[in-house]
Image (cartoon, rainbow, N blue to C red):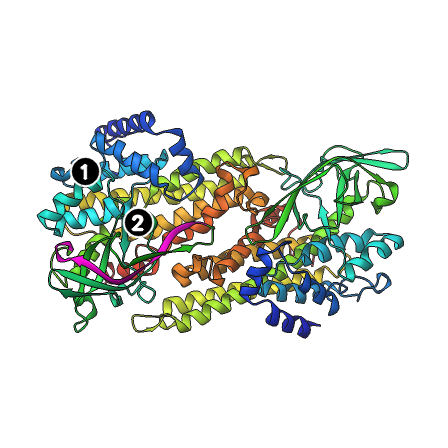
Amino acid sequence: MELQFNADEIAFREEVRAFIADNLTEEMKQGMLRGGYLIRDHVIEWQRILNKKGWGVPHWPVEWGGAGWSPIKQSIFTEELQLAPAPRPLSFSVYMVGPVIIEFGSEYQKKRFLPRIANSDDWWCQGFSEPDAGSDLASLKTNARREGDYYIVNGQKTWTSYAQYADWIFCLVRTDPTVKKQMGISFLLIDMKTPGITVRPIQTIDGGHEVNEVFFDNVKVPSENLVGEENKGWDYAKFLLSAERVNLARLGVSKERLQRARELAARTPYQGRPLLEHDGFRTKLAALEVELKALEITQLRVLSAEGQSHGAPDPASSILKVKGSELQQATSNLLVQILGPDALRRQDDAFDDWSSMITANYFNWRKVSIFGGSNEIQKTIIAKSILGL
Amino acid sequence: MQDSLVRLLQRSYAFDHRWKYEAATPGWSREIWAQFAEIGLLALPFTSESGGLDGTPVDTMIVMEQLGRHITLEPYLSTIVMAGGILRRAASTEQHESISTKVIDGSLIVSLAHTERGTFGSPSRVGTQAVRSGDLWQISGHKSCVLHGDSADLLIISARTSGAPSDAKGITLFAVDPRATNINIQSYALHDGQRASDIQINSVLVPHSALIGCVDDGFRILQSAEYETLAAVCAEAVGVMSELHQMTVDYLKQRKQFGVPIGNFQALQHRAADMYIALEQARSMAMYAAMMSQTDDKTAIAQAVSSAKVQIGRSAKLIGEEAVQMFGGIGVTMEFKAGHYFKKLTLLEQFLGHADHHLELLTSGPGLFELE
């Protein structure tokens, strides 16, 4: 196993870097530097730029637009985008529902949805969590009743990111309440324009609007929008939750933050000279870099093992999620510490570069250890699946 | 008085009240402030000669913890502790009559305008200048993050009257009317909803009688008021932490997943216990800081408040982040209480120097146990 990139991978990284340098606009870059939020138009525009190059959905099978890259190359690609930083791809589309449709969807669904996902013609959101079904996702209550060629959906989803922009939502719904909770769940694709759907925004503590509640009141969904078989939705959901693994650690996000931490510390005076010149700060920075390097190597190990086996996802990818989120949070906090007294104020126009968003981003980034299977759930996976406890 | 305060806050400082206070001008409740005056809260730390109640730093600690429990927005820290701390140490009899009595009866809000942009870690670095001509002083400069600067009826401005930009000697304090022409106040909200201001002072003229304390002797007063404020901030943070920890424990008992309250999971029980340990360690240090503040040994006070701030910073980060994690999604929503306590803790961690800064101060000192 290689713990360093080979010549081919290094050449690939250069190619990706050059492409980003030629195509990423300053506006998109500034948008990313300022915050953790997806800017709708930037996401769509950038996805189309990548798609035109054949890099829109590189991790998909070649017949549906994939690039045929190794997992290592995929992770190099993802990391370069994060380092730039370029608009994050809409993971609900390209990392979640896309791979599920490819693996379990009908021919009709593949032809109808996949090209539109690759080109960002449809914006997808995820209808999994409910008020009483968070970590215990399988206890979800939103139900779908079959009536002729339709399902009638009633219930409520929550923490639905970017539902305000969404054309479609993929949902876990209960189709059989009489069996063990995991066995009665189905996976439905629902057009957000269908009558009976209401989206209510949830404001987060950083002042932003990213997540929503989505209510379903007798929503009529054509049965052709059922993915795979009825009552097999839980299997598809498990597949989906592990499908984002090349992007789980988000190494590039943390690396890019460390770069900025250096830049900010170099221009922030502390005790009359730049903070970056202080030993205490440099020790702290170095310690975080060591942890990030360890995670980078761990990711390489997980990805190379997966490249060889072509099998089910390695439960070790939970390490990537736990450590990756912890480091994203530690680096977002480091930026707050560098700001010191300037971290107190909310964003305002008088103080408008990316540094004004640092504290808000620290607040917002608490989410990464909560969503997509909380770190508690990930540790349970490690304890049960790897350690056999 | 503690009982009256607890009752007042329970009655008038529920979370939805706080929203209303924050949303309306001036961003806090004048009605609550009047009630603070009524129960003697505003008089507490002032001496009886200036109309106060001779309260000690330990009394202030008790009050600040209660205010922290409700993440109150009123200018108690800025007016009574910080600016009040300056007045208690340096105001003349006339100034006590014209300023302190009005502070005590609740009719005057005073803010200290000392900090300037880019001076973190250099408390004596004052770029604002004051030049004397006859019986007048002309002040010019810029102050940053003045707490409640927009509702202040009076500013205490620090200015350099002699010496090099970072000299401890040569700083003088002036009482200045913020409504004076040539003062430009730009206000904004802090992350906890409190208001603060950047203040531009362009050749403002004040009489010699506006001096608080002696010429060139301001830093000593500033520093000792800052120690008092640090001890108060530590106590406030303990109040915020206790309340947030209690909310978290209640939630662990009430929130069900997998058919049981999530507090049944030992992994979460241990983390709640870690939070509790962090809380009690913080409480100990807040008490230590308050008690040491009652002594006359300035080196010991400086060490005590810095070491308290280190412990508070660490406990606040652990408790704030862990609480949000255990609440899950609702912990980061605006409509739910816990996230606001987390934000307040983040703010208090950074206010008057974060843990790293105070560690840095401690490493240059003689060592906490060598004094004994």
Rendering coords of residue B19 (x, y %): 55, 60
For the point 57% across and 57% down, which residue is it? Answer: B312
Left or right: A35 in relation to A69: right
- The spot of residue A213 in percent (x, y) is 35, 58
Check chain identity for marks 1 and 2: say if they share one. yes
Give the amino acid type for the residue marked by disc 2 in the picture.
Answer: Leu
In the image, farthest residue toward the front: A195
Say which quadrant the C terminus of chain B sits in. bottom right
Q: Which residue is mark 1?
A: A70
The foreground one among B262 and A273 is B262
Q: Residue at x 77, y 52 (%)?
A: B86
* Label 2: how many Cα within 10 Å (few below 14, some 14–19, many 20+): many
Q: Position of residue B10 (x, y in %)?
A: 60, 71
For label 2, the residue is A320
**Mark 1 residue type:** Ser
Q: Main secondary structure of the magenta part?
A: strand
Secondary element under disc 2, as helix, strand or loop, is helix
What quarter of the picture does the N terminus of chain B occupy?
bottom right
Residue ranking furthest to the left: A107
The part of the chain drawn in magenta is: A208-225
> Would residue B5 appear left or right of A309 to someone viewing this image?
right
Q: Distance of mark 1 from mark 2, alpha carbons?
A: 18 Å
Q: Is residue A223 magenta?
A: yes
Q: Chain of mark 2?
A: A
Asked if the stretch drawn in magenta spans residue B120, the answer is: no
Asked whether, in this view, residue B151 is left or right of residue A179, the answer is right
Q: Whole-percent x and y of residue B36?
A: 71, 66
Say few, some or many: other residues with alpha carbon within 10 Å of mark 1 (under 14 / 14 to 19 / 20 or more). Answer: some
Is A285 placed above or below B16 here? above
Looking at the rendering, which quadrant does residue B129 occupy?
Answer: top right
* Residue at image location 82% in from the left, 51% down from the top: B90
**Considering only order in the chain, which callout, 2 or 1, is on the residue closer to the N terminus?**
1
